[in-house]
Image: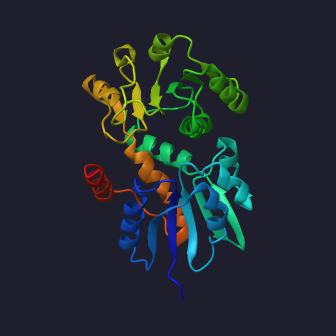
Amino acid sequence: MTQPHAKVIGWPIGHSRSPIIHRHWLGMHDIEGDYSAQDVAPEDLAGFVRTVGVDGLRGCNVTIPHKVAVMALADHVTPVARAIGAANTLWFADGALHATNTDVSGYMAHLSASAPELDLRDAHVLVFGAGGAARAIIYGLLRAGVRQIVVANRTRENVEKLQRDFGPQISHADDVEHALLQADLVVNTTSLGMVGQPALSCDVSLLKDTAVVSDIVYAPLETPMLSDARRRGLTTVDGLGMLLHQAVEGFALWFGVTPVVDATLRDKVVASLSQR
């Protein structure tokens, strides 16, 4: 019998920490299986996707630049993936290929675990960025009942598209300082603050004492914005937890066990980041 296995695909894919995450869980649950990374060029994507469900390949994670293209190759796409416009997880079941997006559940689970005191019902949120990650996070926040999401982005047209797709609770940040004063949650979904990138300009001194500051960047683990917020005594939410929690749903779909994100797993991934 062919050993069950899953993959993460992208172009390139060498940076991925997903094999560390899933191999940790395979070992924890004594599952005879494997998880590996595979470079797949855009012109080879359709051919690779046809191998899902064959010879024990239960499914895969999908990263840049394939998240949009794989949706057209799946037999069934979940409502969450359609709403976001991208899929990051494929699995084969009942003779068909399914696609979903687990970034939503990953971000929301990590936010809940890191800031349990944050009540999102009727909350005001400031989001920096309007790309794919922002779409996933905004979708999750709206489902949780937030009142208003103000989006700060250089291209106003991208924010207007978010408003068309998700509704009037989305608005453009014409006055970022005012948005900071109102915010219960601030989220950076851009690459600013990442290693090699300039810091995000965010004056955390304007935030209320109960505000939560979140950054999806995980290299470095503590970005300048998070460092400033921590020194102010605010609750901070780093980007690594989203990476860890978004993997839970895929593992459960492929291997039939719902794993837990624990300190041992987090330590393994943190250690790998220092070896970049």
Residue 170: image location, x then y, percent: 63, 24
At x 47% / y 32%, what residue is drawn?
A: 190
Residue 223: image location, x then y, percent: 32, 33
Left or right: 150, with 92 as reference point: left
Q: How is the image coloured?
A: rainbow
At x 58% / y 67%, what residue is drawn?
A: 59
Give the camera-side residue of 251 and 193. 193
Furthest-bottom residue in this view: 1
Residue 222: image location, x then y, percent: 30, 36
Using the rendered image of the protein, determine whether residue 256 is visible from the camera's viewpoint. no
Q: Quadrant of residue 16?
A: bottom left
At x 44% / y 73%, what residue is drawn?
A: 34
Residue 112 position (above or below residue 270): above
Residue 182: image location, x then y, percent: 48, 16
Left or right: 7, with 222 as reference point: right
Q: How many marks?
A: 0
Residue 172 position (above or below residue 246): above
Give the camera-side residue of 127 and 232. 127
